[in-house]
Amino acid sequence: MGLFGSKKSHQAGQVDMSRLPRHIAIIMDGNGRWAKQRGLPRTAGHKAGAEVFRRIATYCRKLGVEYLTVYAFSTENWKRPADEVSTIMGLLGQYIREAVASMEQEQIRLKFFGDVSALDPELQQLIAKTNEISSHIQGCQANICLNYGGRDELIRGARAFAADCAAGKCRPEDLTEAMFGNYLYSAGIPDPELIIRPSGEIRLSNFLLWQCAYSEFYFCDTLWPDFTEQTLDAAIIDYQKRDRRFGGIKK
Ligand code: FPP
């Protein structure tokens, strides 16, 4: 089985519910191109993309996927035109406001990966509220990467570990991979078994650099606003055909 997904939106076969990935991560790419194809402003693509995120999060919860991590705004996305940045932030605000009202009923917990202290104070308050509600909900956890960069996450983790060493709480020679993982936004969350990037781009773009060590990658041409439950099924079916050896050999 190759690195690439089927170009068709459907793939033969069915998801094996007994071998679902616990954690799926998605780079929600292609919103701008989707809008351009329709003669719409890029911001229309992000609006459609936010809707697709809602649907896919609900579908993951229905399937029984425990964690869904999405790349919503990177540390590099500030370079985009101001109106595009403010539309994305507005959509996030709108989503979080709705989530505050519905997450208990929907059974979707929310967590944010990234430096949220740089965001608008109102957005930060909303995030704090969802963190509080999430602490007493079971169900699927959606991790939204917001002002997130994989290298930035690693630097922050390294700084925090160095500060703990300087404070005498630990020693550099005692650091293990498991310990270092606890200094990252994803502390306590299993690594994603499956990382999906739609829209035909074949790169990681600073996403989950530590956590992707043994992830399976799935790339497809579908633009994110066209991504459906069937596209996710096709990615999971493809993942289920892979032979995961983690550096070992097949028994
Ligand atoms: C990448 O497509 C997409 C983004 C940088 C923004 C993603 C944001 C959302 C889907 C909206 C808010 C999210 C949530 C969770 C409610 P692109 O603009 O780079 O597309 P292009 O490559 O076609 O230009």
Image (tube, rainbow, N blue to C red):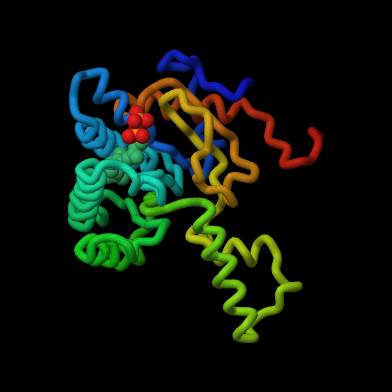
Where residue 16 appears, as percent x and y from the top left, is 52, 30
- Say which residue appears at 28% left-offset and 34% top-offset: 49
Relative vertical location of residue 122 with respect to residue 3 in this rendering, above or below: below
Left or right of residue 241: residue 133: left
Image quarter where the N terminus lies is top right
Residue lying at 26% horizontally and 54% vertically, measured from the top left: 103
Can you give x and y, in whole percent of width and height, for residue 217 in the image? 56, 33
Q: Residue furthest bottom?
A: 168
Specify whether 123 is left or right of 74.
Answer: left
Which of the four quarters of the rendered structure image does ligand 1 lie in?
top left
- Of the pair 80 and 181, the residue shown nearer to us: 80
Left/right placement of residue 15 relative to residue 89 reads: right
Q: Residue at x 36, y 25 (%)?
A: 223
Residue 244 point in image, percent of width and height: 68, 35
Does residue 116 lie above or below 193 as drawn? below
The number of callouts visible is 0
Does residue 161 appear to the left or right of 198 in the view shown?
right
Nearest the camera: 107 or 167? 167
Q: Nearer the viewer, residue 26 or 82?
A: 82
Q: Is residue 15 visible?
A: no
Q: What quarter of the picture does the C terminus occupy?
A: top right
Would residue 86 be visible to someone looking at this image?
Answer: yes
Q: Quick check: 19 above or below 33?
A: below
Q: Position of residue 194 (x, y in %)?
A: 54, 38
The residue under the point 55% across, 53% down is 190
